[in-house]
Image (cartoon, rainbow, N blue to C red):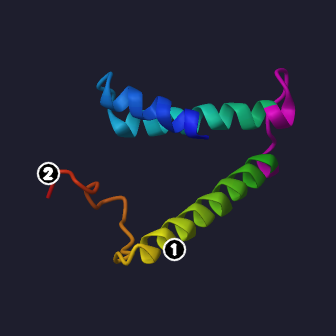
Amino acid sequence: MSEFIGMANTMVNDKGFDMKLVSAALMAASGVYATFTAAGNEGFLAPNGIDRVADMYKKNLAYIQQRKKEELEAKGLEAKPVTETDPPAGSNES
């Protein structure tokens, strides 16, 4: 996983790609690979397969957020959740 994060950081920090574009590309690549893993090169997911993959993503994302919250709290920092409409931390957006 760290190699993917490193690649994403290089694309944003060194090559100037938009962070949201890189995030979307990683999600798309993950979806393509999840489809390949389940159905191979010549198949695709039925609606219930899409729901199963989406549920796995949702559970994994919730787990990641819980771990992030615990890490912040262990450092004595305020674990404050943000929404999609909040500007990213460290940005000059308001």
- Residue 10 vs residue 34: left or right? left
The boundaries of the magenta stretch are 37-48
Instruction: Residue under label 2, please give it.
Output: 92
Asked if residue 50 is positioned above or below residue 70 in the image, the reply reads above
- Residue 6 vs residue 91: left or right? right
Quarter of the rendering occupied by the N terminus: top right
- Image quadrant of residue 2? top right
Q: How many marks?
A: 2
SS of the residue at dot 2? loop
Type of amino acid at the residue the image marks with label 1: Glu
Type of amino acid at the residue the image marks with label 2: Asn
- Residue 54 vs residue 23: left or right? right
- Image quadrant of residue 79? bottom left
Measure the alpha-carbon separation of dots 1 and 2: 27 Å
Which of the two residues, 89 or 52, is positioned nearer the viewer here?
89
Number of the front mark, 1 or 2 = 1
Q: Which residue is drawn at the image coordinates 84% and 37% (left, top)?
A: 38
Near mark 1 (Cα within 10 A), the count class, few <14, some 14-19 or many ≥20, is some
Q: Which residue is drawn at the image coordinates 56% and 67% (left, top)?
A: 67
Which of the two residues, 89 or 35, is positioned nearer the viewer here?
89
Instruction: Residue under label 1, please give it.
Output: 70
